[in-house]
């Protein structure tokens, strides 16, 4: 059976997942602070827009104005896509407080109300006819109630996958944590990409590994990547082993 794939648009990454992420997969993008999770998810969305694939970004930890500014710094100006209706930002950060927030179209008034959150997300996805989505970060949804983490993730998965959306869900972990962001979270996802920032011979090195990806073969080695002025670039021809970065 032919697997429908979504091209990430991130140089070097698709080689790790046999040509692209399987369509409708809900992928957990996990890592500690400074590892590039937000940039990866925004780049995934913008490259989709450039390919004619509408998208939705849910921001739970930053003001939408700041998000647009950060994306523009990489050359990813999403305003024209918002104006034409192929891209939307769901504001789940401000609660509608502030003059700038009042101009946002999709606003979650109370993040504690998961039902409202799902309704606003569903509306944005349908209005844009989204094919891609990113939620930054899902950790905010369940940190205060870890027992419900799996339930929240499953609700998200049903909404996103049900509408045919391929999505990245950013998950925060501490620097020393070996997991992916919470009890049961990894089981609710179709894929897991782990981003890390480690000291190698006195220098900080960013690396990633595809921990799992349903529906496709994937690379099982750790590869270095860097954040450039144009976003993330993955070096699929190099492997991080212990304290050494090796070329294949």
Image (cartoon, grey):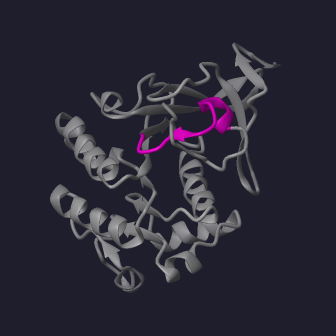
Residue 76 picture quarter: bottom right
- Residue 167 as seen in the image, left or right of residue 197: left
Residue 245 placed where, x, y %? 78, 21
Q: Name the residue located 66 percent from the left edge and 50 percent from the top edge.
A: 9
Residue closer to the observer: 227 or 198: 227
Residue 229 falls within the magenta-colored stretch:
no
Residue 157 placed where, x, y %? 30, 45
Q: Quadrant of the C terminus?
A: top right
Q: Name the residue located 71 percent from the left edge and 14 percent from the top edge.
A: 241
User: Residue at the right extreme?
Assistant: 247
- Residue 203 as seen in the image, left or right of residue 40: right
Residue closer to the observer: 26 or 20: 20
Residue closer to the observer: 105 or 198: 105
Q: Name the residue located 68 percent from the left edge and 33 percent from the top edge.
A: 15
Residue 2 placed where, x, y %? 52, 35
User: Residue at the top extreme?
Assistant: 242
Residue 24 falls within the magenta-colored stretch:
yes
Residue 163 placed where, x, y %? 33, 55
- Residue 194 as seen in the image, left or right of residue 240: left
Give the tally of numbered discs: 0
Q: Name the residue located 19 percent from the left edge and 41 percent from the top edge.
A: 145
Q: Is residue 86 above or below residue 164?
A: below
Please give the range of residues in magenta: 13-25
User: Residue at the front extreme?
Assistant: 1
Is residue 234 in sight in this rendering?
A: yes
Is residue 174 in sight in this rendering?
A: no
């Amino acid at each position: 059976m032919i697997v429908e794939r979504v091209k990430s648009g991130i140089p070097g990454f698709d080689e790790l997942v046999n040509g692209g992420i399987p369509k409708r997969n809900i992928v957990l993008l996990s890592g500690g602070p400074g590892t590039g999770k937000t940039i990866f998810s925004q780049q995934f969305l913008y490259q989709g827009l450039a390919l004619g694939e509408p998208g939705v970004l849910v921001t739970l930890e930053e003001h939408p104005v700041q998000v647009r500014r950060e994306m523009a710094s990489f050359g990813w100006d999403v305003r024209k896509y918002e104006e034409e209706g192929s891209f939307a930002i769901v504001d789940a950060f401000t609660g509608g407080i502030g003059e700038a927030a009042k101009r946002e179209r999709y606003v979650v008034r109370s993040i504690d109300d998961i039902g409202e959150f799902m309704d606003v997300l569903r509306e944005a996805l349908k209005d844009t006819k989204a094919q891609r989505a990113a939620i930054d970060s899902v950790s905010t949804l369940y940190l205060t109630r870890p027992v419900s983490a799996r339930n929240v993730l499953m609700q998200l998965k049903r909404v996103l996958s049900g509408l045919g959306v391929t999505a990245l869900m950013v998950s925060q972990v501490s620097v020393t944590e070996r997991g992916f962001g919470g009890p049961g979270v990894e089981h609710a996802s179709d894929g897991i990409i782990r981003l890390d920032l480690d000291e190698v011979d006195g220098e900080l090195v960013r690396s990633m590994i595809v921990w799992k990806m349903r529906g496709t073969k994937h690379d099982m080695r750790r590869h270095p990547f860097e954040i450039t002025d144009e976003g993330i670039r993955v070096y699929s021809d190099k492997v991080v082993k212990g304290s050494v970065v090796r070329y294949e």
